[in-house]
Amino acid sequence: MRELVRSLWRVLGLWFFAYWLAKLFAITWPVACLGIGCLAVNSRCFSPRTLQQIPSLATFFLSLFMTLLGFQINLQAVPKLGFLALLLILGIVVGISLLGILSGKKLGLSSEISLFIALGSAICGASAIAAAAVFFPEERARQEAGISIGVISGIGMLGIFVLPWLIKQWDLGPTEAGLLVGGSLQSLAHVFITGFNLGPEVGSYAALIKMGRVLFIAPALLILGLWGEHGKGSSAGWRFLPRCFYGFLLALLVANSLPIPGGVLTGLRISSDMVMALALACLGLQLQGPLLLHAVRAFVLGLGLFTGLLSGLLLLAIFFG
C-alpha cells in the first residue's frame, strides 16, 4: 500500500509537469502526459517497484474516466443533426470501425491495437481508446492502447494543418467545411481548433457533426462489453460488463435528464479531462521495450483510415454540397 501511494505521488508529479508542458507547446494535456510518461519510463526515471504499481493505477483511472465520460455526451445534438446527417455519421462509424479492424489484421497488427485505432479514428480519438482499454486489463493491451492514442493524436495534429488548406483549395462553404472537419478529425479539441479558426459557422457545424460521432461511443462500448470480452464469446453476456460501464450509463442519463447547473456540468467535464490525463500518464509509463516498433504499422493503419475518410467526405462535399 505504501509503494502504491508513492507511485501515485510520482504519477501526479508527472501529470502536473505535463500540464505546463502542454501549455508551452500548445498540445493537449492528455497527450503530453502520454509522451512524458513514455520518456520517463524509457529513461529509467522510475524504479521497478514503482512501475509494478502502475497497472493498478491505470485500471483505476481508466475506470473512473469511463464513468465521467457519460457527462461529456450531449443527446440534444440528435434532433439538431437531422436524419441524413445521422445516417452519414452512422456510416462513418460502422465503415471506419470495420475497415480498421480488417486492415489491421492485414498489416500484421494484433486485434486489440487494430480495434483501438479503428475506434479512435471512427468516434472520438483518445477518449474512445481510453474507454475501450477498460475491457482489456492485460499489460500488452494497455501498452497498445497507449501507442494507439499517440498515433491517433499525431495524425489529428497533421489534420489541423491539412484541412484548412484543402478547404481553401476547393473553396468549400461553411456547411461543407464543417462536415469535412467534424467528420474526419478524431479529437474534439482538434475539431474546435480547426473549425473555429475557419469561422464561427464552420466551427459550430463541425462541433455538431463531431458530437454526432461521439454519441456512438455508448453503443460501441456496449457491443465491446457484450461480445468482445477477450474471446469469451457472446455467451459472456452482462456478467462481464465492468461496473464503470454502468456508471457511464448513469452519468449519461443524469447529464441529459436532470436540471444540473451549467457550472456543475462544466466542472464534471473538466474533471473527466483531468482523469483522462492521469490515465494516459499511467499508460505512457507502460510503453517500453520492442512493442514500440508496432507504432510504425499502427501509424500506417491510422493514416490510411484518416486519408480514406477525408477523401470520401471531400468528394461528398464537392459533388453534393
Image (tube, grey):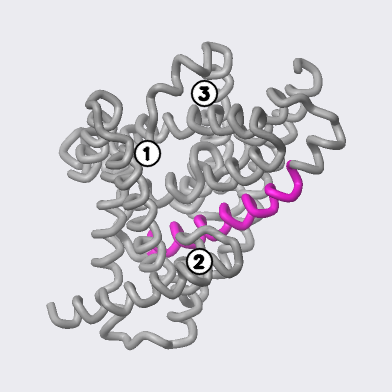
Crowd class of label 2 (few under 14; some 14 to 19; many from 20; radius 10 Å) = many
Instruction: Name the residue rendered at 36%, 85% in the picture.
Output: 46
Relative to residue 147, is residue 249 depicted above or below?
above
Q: Secondary structure at mark 1?
A: helix
Q: Position of residue 302 (x, y in %)?
A: 61, 49
Q: In the drawing, what numbered circle is on residue 32?
A: 2
Instruction: Name the residue rendered at 57%, 18% in the picture.
Output: 85
Q: In the drawing, what numbered circle is on residue 11?
A: none
- Type of residue at label 1? Gln
Quarter occupied by residue 240:
top left
Magenta residues: mostly which secondary structure? helix
Q: Position of residue 207 (x, y in %)?
A: 55, 33
C-beta proximity under 8 Å, tags 2 and 1? no
- Type of residue at label 2? Ala
Q: Which residue is mark 1?
A: 72
C-beta proximity under 8 Å, tags 2 and 3? no
For marks 1 and 3 on the same chain, the one whose residue lies earlier in the sequence: 1
Relative to residue 7, is residue 218 depicted above or below?
above
Residue numbers of the magenta segment:
140-163
Quarter in which the N terminus is drawn: bottom left
Q: Is residue 160 magenta?
A: yes
Closer to the camera: disc 1 or disc 3? Answer: 1
Compared across the picture, whether 135 is left or right of 168 comes to left
Instruction: Name the residue rendered at 24%, 66% in the picture.
Output: 56
Q: Farthest left residue?
A: 1
Compared across the picture, whether 81 is left or right of 155 comes to left
Q: Which residue is mark 3?
A: 90
- Type of residue at label 3? Leu
Q: Is residue 93 magenta?
A: no
